[in-house]
């Protein structure tokens, strides 16, 4: 399949190259922002510190850089601003343009991914695994280098806590596992990735902050929605128009972060006790998820089991959660006049296909491609085999 055929059947793949985006997923974030105002365009100073998880190849970080640092507008909002400027004349038009396109001050953006990512202007890039506990200290140190100096080897006294001096306004996660085709397995792995992203978000978000993450809508996805509702005032499910309707992919948009109540065990306070436990409950009285990536198992009553957790949260069992099922609103994002991600479009006769803006730096399938090339292609070497 050539480049032109893919450009024809995937409009957003073509537009991403034409508009200098690293991946077509940039349009998903733009369309979600149009619906939920993630970047608070009416109050620019309220969103200046953002964390982008699973960032490679960097399309969402690219959107953050161009919107927050450079002050650019895209999609429907750009059209509305242009139309508004056309209705004004003279000096008023110039003043409004300066206000609308003014870059924000003191912007801090940290991008994390297990795969290497080509640097972006104004973005701090970390190569780390979001499912590993050691990533939280690295993230906090990247956000505030002066507040978290490098600790000496073997010292555990400098482990960052939930109460850091400069919390984050927005946490994004567009991560997804390499799908296997076994839907139950893919949905389970994706849910664990979401919990790992939520674990990081709880450690860095400010009260009232926002959290956006990719999710696969499966059979028991409503339980995940209910667990998110325990720490966020409002939870919605967004389906951007640039996301294919045939895909189970969607995005949970969580607004109004409410920090969970952390009750430290007597062991952590220096008092010997064999029955001390740490319990976290949401503001609605529902226990948070009993998941190792979310802070430990609730069934463990040993103080040592909770002392190894990066945040120090221990959760209650989901079996004791009353009314644990809750279904959030499902919102389609993007104009109806926008391109259809599932449709094929006719290309103009003089159309020239472009190369991707940023090819994968170190794709996990690189070795597989090299071996297939050595074997002579997808189906192996067939020359001289027929008739032998």
Image (spheres, rainbow, N blue to C red):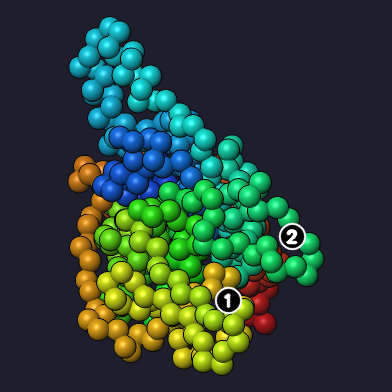
x and y percentages locating residue 125 in the rendered image:
62, 49
| Circle 1: element type | loop
Residue 131, quarter of the rendered image:
bottom right
Frontmost residue, 332 versus 228: 228
Q: Residue at x 56, y 92 (%)?
A: 274
Q: Position of residue 144 (x, y in %)?
A: 60, 48
Count how many numbered circles sit on residues in the image. Answer: 2
Name the outermost residue toward the front. Answer: 271
Residue 176: tell me if it is visible. no
Task: Relative to 225, say whether 150 is above or below.
Answer: above
Q: Nearer the viewer, residue 11 or 116?
A: 116
Q: Position of residue 200 (x, y in %)?
A: 51, 63
Which callout, 1 or 2, points at the residue further toward the start of the chain? Answer: 2
Frontmost of labels 1 and 2 is 1
Please tell me which residue is depicted at 24% across the width and 78% down the height of the picture: 325
Are the residues flagged by discs 1 and 2 in contact, CB closer than 8 Å?
no
In the rendered image, which residue does mark 1 sit on?
269
- Residue 114 lies in quadrant: bottom right
Residue of label 2: 151
User: Residue at left 46%, top 74%?
Assistant: 263
Q: Secondary structure at mark 2?
A: loop
In the displayed structure, would residue 101 be above or below residue 227? above
Q: Quadrant of the C terminus?
A: bottom right
State the residue in front, 89 or 295: 295
Residue drawn at x 49%, y 51% as measured from the top left: 167
Q: Which mark is residue 377?
A: none
Dividing the picture into quadrants, the one containing residue 89 is top left
Mark 2 residue crowding within 10 angstroms, few (<14) / some (14–19) / many (20+): few
User: Front-most of 21 and 311?
Assistant: 311
Measured from the top left, where is residue 150 in percent x and y?
A: 73, 55
- Residue 27 in view, yes or no: yes
């Amino acid at each position: 399949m050539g480049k032109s055929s893919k450009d024809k059947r995937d409009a957003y793949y073509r537009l991403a190259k034409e508009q200098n985006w690293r991946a077509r997923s940039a349009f998903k974030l733009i369309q979600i922002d149009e619906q939920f105002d993630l970047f608070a365009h009416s109050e620019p100073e309220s969103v200046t510190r953002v964390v982008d998880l699973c960032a490679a190849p960097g399309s969402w970080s690219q959107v953050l850089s161009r919107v927050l640092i450079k002050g650019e507008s895209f999609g429907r909002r750009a059209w509305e601003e242009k139309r508004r400027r056309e209705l004004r004349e003279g000096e008023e038009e110039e003043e409004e343009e300066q206000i609308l396109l003014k870059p924000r001050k003191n912007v801090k953006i940290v991008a994390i991914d297990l795969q290497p990512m080509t640097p972006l202007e104004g973005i701090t890039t970390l190569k780390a695994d979001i499912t590993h506990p050691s990533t939280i200290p690295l993230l906090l140190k990247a956000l505030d280098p002066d507040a978290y100096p490098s600790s000496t080897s073997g010292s555990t006294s400098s482990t960052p806590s939930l109460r850091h001096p400069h919390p984050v306004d927005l946490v994004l996660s567009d991560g997804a596992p390499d799908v296997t085709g076994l839907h139950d397995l893919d949905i389970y792995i994706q849910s664990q990735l979401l919990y790992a992203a939520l674990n990081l978000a709880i450690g860095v978000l400010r009260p009232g902050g926002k959290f956006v993450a990719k999710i696969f809508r499966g059979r028991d996805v409503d339980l995940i929605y209910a667990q998110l509702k325990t720490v966020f005032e409002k939870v919605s499910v967004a389906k951007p128009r640039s996301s294919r309707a045939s895909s189970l992919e969607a995005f949970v948009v969580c607004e109004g972060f409410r920090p969970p109540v952390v009750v430290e065990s007597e062991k952590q306070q220096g008092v010997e006790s064999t029955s001390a436990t740490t319990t976290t409950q949401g503001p609605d009285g529902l226990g948070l998820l009993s998941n190792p990536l979310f802070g430990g198992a609730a069934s463990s009553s040993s103080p040592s089991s909770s002392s190894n957790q990066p945040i120090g949260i221990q959760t209650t069992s989901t079996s004791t959660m009353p009314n644990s099922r809750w279904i959030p609103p499902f919102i389609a994002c993007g104009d109806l006049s926008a391109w259809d991600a599932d449709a094929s479009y006719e290309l103009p006769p003089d159309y020239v296909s472009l190369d991707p803006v940023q090819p994968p730096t170190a794709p996990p399938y690189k070795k597989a491609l090299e071996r297939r090339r050595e074997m002579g292609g997808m189906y192996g070497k067939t020359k001289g085999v027929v008739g032998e």
